[in-house]
Amino acid sequence: MKIKTALSILAIATSLFAFESKYLPGYDIQTKCDQVLHKRAYDTCYSYKWKTPKLAVYKIDGEKLKSSSHYSRKGLTFKPDYSIKTRHRSYTRDYSRTGFDRGHLAENGSFNYDKVFQKETFKTSNIAPEKPNLNRGVWARIEKFSRIQAIRNKSVSVITGVCGTLGHIKNSVNIPRYWYKIIFKPDGQQIAFLAPNTNNIKRDAKMRYFLVPISKIEEQCNLQFVKNN
């Protein structure tokens, strides 16, 4: 009886910490979200403690990327997300003069065919501190690679996330230790990248150096990606 009770409690706890997204059907992401944000272009698992997202889940539409006109990001600025309570919210000023970029989880480049979607990616609930050499170097190429995969496969589902801590910038915003991205192709294959949040990465570093099995991300970030069918 005690064993059955313990298993029941474990099952309830697991279900409470399972994050699901329509952009990645068939998977449960087992991690604790303080607030789930359903945007038009992506879903976000947000951490009150970190004042950043833990991860964003979205689909990149390769057909729209290939055939649509694209809007410039010129004039776009980061805006607070007022759906998050003030005490848990981050602001663009928190990043000023900290040595960190405002790193997108759901990246602008994958949604710049739609002005509304594009603006959503500039919510502060979609960013975390990212070192410039990572953000403007290999990570930018990994983002471009995900768009190339979407065009080749018509669409892909993507999880971009952060985990761990290297301290804080202003307003107690967490500095993640790692950034990761997982690309889910329609044929069932996955391509995963995990990168340390450091300026020690050369801007011309090869993407292959950051390829990892998904299990490595699960281990480093204390979460699980579980197929539910």
Image: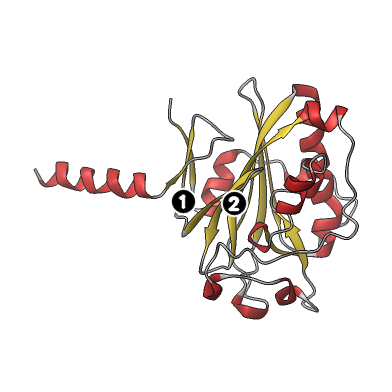
For disc 1, the neighbor class at 10 Å (few under 14, some 14 to 19, many from 20) is many
Q: Which residue is drawn at 75% across and 53% down?
A: 119
Amino acid identity at mark 2? Leu
Q: Whole-percent x and y of residue 33?
A: 47, 55
Quadrant housing residue 208: top right
Which of 86/172 is in front?
A: 86
In this figure, which residue is indicated by the disc labeled 2? 55
Rendered-image quadrant of the C terminus? top left
Q: What residue type is labelled 1?
A: Thr
Count of marks placed on residues: 2
Q: Which of 50 and 224 is in front in this view?
A: 50
32 in relation to 208, above or below: below
Where is residue 68 shown, x and y percent of the image? 86, 32
Instruction: Give the SS element for disc 2.
Output: strand
- Taking the spot 51% from the left edge, 67% from the top edge, the residue there is 48
Measured as percent of width and height from the top left, residue 147 is found at 79, 35
Tell me: 191 left or right of 23: right
The N terminus: image quadrant: top left
Left of 68 or right of it: where is 182? left
Task: Return the residue at label 1.
Answer: 31
Instruction: Evaluate if marks 2 and 1 touch, with contact meaning CB atoms under 8 Å apart.
Output: yes
Residue 99, percent from left and from top: 80, 74
Cα distance in 3D space between marks 2 and 1: 10 Å
Tell me, for residue 16, which label it has, or none: none
The colour scheme is: secondary structure
Q: Which residue lies furthest to the front in this view?
A: 116
Element under disc 1: loop
120 left or right of 71? left
Q: Residue at x 74, y 76 (%)?
A: 93
Q: In this view, does 162 lie above or below 19?
A: below
